[in-house]
Image (cartoon, rainbow, N blue to C red):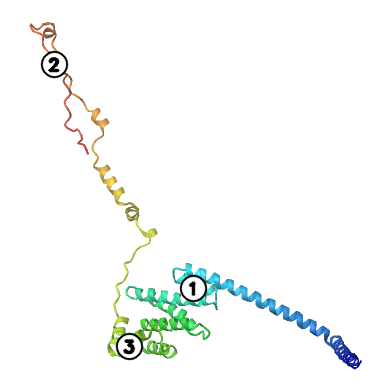
Amino acid sequence: MKSQHRHELQTNELSKVADKVVGSMGGFFETYGNRVLIGFCVAAVVASLVIYKTRRDRSNEAAAWRELSNARNAEDYAGVSESHPGTAAGRWARVHEGESRLAEGVQLLFTNVESGSKELKLAREALQAIVDQKGAPPEIRERALFGLARCLEAMSDGSETEAVKTYQALLREFPATIYKKDADDRIEALGSGSGQAFYAWFAKYDRPKPSEKRPRDRMSDDEMESSLTGPEEEAEGAAAAEEPASAEKIADAPKEPAGEVPASDAEKKPDTEELPAPESKPEKPDSEPKSP
């Protein structure tokens, strides 16, 4: 009996607690029910936006890598970086653009200073854009810093201060960089008098001027015809000029009359049978063309 009584008391206590909880929850929902519902809706919308953004970023990143793999020149790399800013592929495309323009600019410096300087300026802008992005991945910043230092060195006219500072910034930020030996060698070479003297001499180097070519619309008629006529056409024209008289003209030339047999001789019969004489052929004219 006592155990049964205790069980009834515990049940009553639990029911009282449950009633209090339900009562308090009912009052809470009555007071804050709308706010709770709005909060759940906002959380669902935020979660949906996060999922959508994540999927879109992944899709853009994949498209950027595909376009980067198909790029072949500086213009292609620039297009990828402009179409996909902020992505890893877009940043790598910017670095490749700078390196491509750097190589082209250095080559042009030997023949056309104006065009070479223009390419080097574009290369510097592309590489500097990556260096200024503090959020860029370390491996991209490392390569961009090294390329920027090389670009500043190529643009030098004898003062190597900017190039040396950039090499030193690379070594400070990336002490174990794979470009450490190259950077140390360039700092040593540019700090010596020979390196500065070379770039000062190269800046004043007299480049050969490209040959001047007039546009086709300013050429004379003879020059235009000669420029459009190939070697085979010229050979055919020369052969036509030296071609001998045609066969029809040779056939129209007068021929010598064939010899006539006198009547008295024709009536005479030979004592012995003679073989017929071979038919005489007309003599060939002296002007017969030779075989080509």
Residue drawn at the location 30% of the way across and 86% of the way down: 195
Q: Is residue 192 above or below residue 210?
A: below
Q: Secondary structure at mark 3?
A: helix
| Tag 1: amino acid | Ala
| C-alpha span from label 2 to label 1 | 95 Å
Residue 212 x/y as whole percent: 33, 66
Mark 2, mark 1: which one is toward the viewer? 1
Lower sequence index among marks 2 and 1:
1
The residue where tag 1 is placed is: 78
Q: Quadrant of residue 74?
A: bottom left
Which quadrant is the N terminus positioned in?
A: bottom right
Q: Earlier in the sequence, mark 3 or mark 1?
A: 1
Q: Which residue is mark 3?
A: 190
Q: Which residue is mark 2?
A: 277
Q: Residue furthest left?
A: 271
Task: Give, as a three-letter code, the residue at label 3.
Answer: Leu
Element at label 1: helix
Q: Residue at x 44, y 81 (%)?
A: 144
